[in-house]
Image (spheres, grey):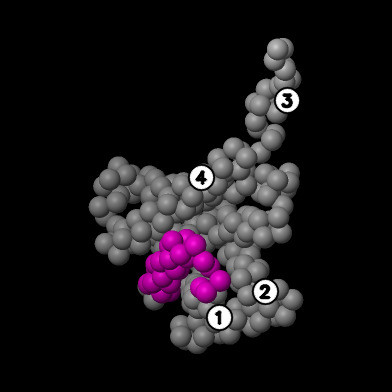
Amino acid sequence: MLVLVIASGILLWYSLFQAFSLRLPLRAATKAVGIVHALWGSALGLYGVFAKPELRTDIIRGSWPFLSTVAAPLSVGFFITDSYLMMKAGSERKGDSSAGNSAFVHHLVLIFALLGYASVGRGDFVAAAFSAMELSTPFVHVRWFLEKSGRTRTVLYMVNGAMLTVVFFLVRVCNMPAVVFFYARQRRAGVMDALHSMPLHCLFFTGAIQALNTFWFSKVCQGALETLRKSDLFRPTFSREKKPVHSKKK
């Protein structure tokens, strides 16, 4: 059943890519599919976290079978498809190999984490929290579209960059520490004791994803600072004023 749903996911996401590629170049079509998946995944995640009280009541045993039997395998299909498309577009990514490699590692970690979760079928609240991380992805892809269309000095680019920084920090950097904190509260234990009680594979994947998200957030902050540095809006007033040139009298 798991393999069948994953195969269906690969077919679904690749078919959507083919539809977008009729009007968009390869990389743009890949980004468009990523936006669709991110909106779907983040909507499911936010719904599970905020609208499913049975998940919040027991973070580990709270059950929402749809996540493990359908949503997670479909997302595995997406990450497999997206990894293939990234490799296919690799020849176009000149001078950006580090970003491409880190994105591929990110996908690989997520594939194994989702496969492990789908096989065990426990921790639906944690899975919903992971899924909510996708809320930042549309802003990442919209920034790429704005850069490729030469709109890096527009208000839209600035607003999107600000939203990306804030949303990324909340849903990716703060996400897992918040889950661990609430897990510790439910167990009425300290954070370190709660971490020690978690299975080793859970600690590994949580730590790996947290490290990758922190790395990506540093890149987001660098991009935001670079945008502010280049923007006329945030330059000091005196730097934009032309100083009068006084000619020397002979």
Indicate which disc, 1 or 2, sits on the residue closer to the N terminus.
1
Q: Is residue 46 above or below residue 186?
A: below
Answer whether labels 3 and 4 touch (C-beta < 8 Å): no
Asked if the magenta segment contains residue 122, the reply would be: no
Q: Position of residue 38 (x, y in %)?
A: 59, 64
The kind of residue on which mark 1 rests is Gly
CA gap between label 1 and label 2 equals 22 Å
Q: Which residue is mark 3?
A: 242
**Is the residue marked by circle 3 packed among few (<14), some (14-19), or many (20+) residues within 10 Å?**
few
Quadrant of the rendering where the C terminus is positioned: top right
Q: Position of residue 136 (x, y in %)?
A: 58, 55
Give the structural element (helix, strand or loop) at label 3. loop
In the picture provided, is 79 more to the left or to the right than 13? left
Q: Which residue is mark 1?
A: 9
Answer whether labels 4 and 2 touch (C-beta < 8 Å): no
Q: Nearer the viewer, residue 133 or 182?
A: 133
Asked if the magenta segment contains residue 93, the reply would be: yes
In the picture provided, is 165 more to the left or to the right than 57? right
**Is the residue marked by circle 4 packed among few (<14), some (14-19), or many (20+) residues within 10 Å?**
few
Answer whether labels 1 and 2 touch (C-beta < 8 Å): no
CA gap between label 2 and label 3 equals 43 Å
Q: Residue furthest front?
A: 250
Q: Nearer the viewer, residue 64 or 135?
A: 135
Q: Nearer the viewer, residue 21 or 56?
A: 21
Q: Which residue is mark 2?
A: 25
Disc 1 or disc 2, which is closer to the eye? Answer: 2
Give the structural element (helix, strand or loop) at label 4. helix
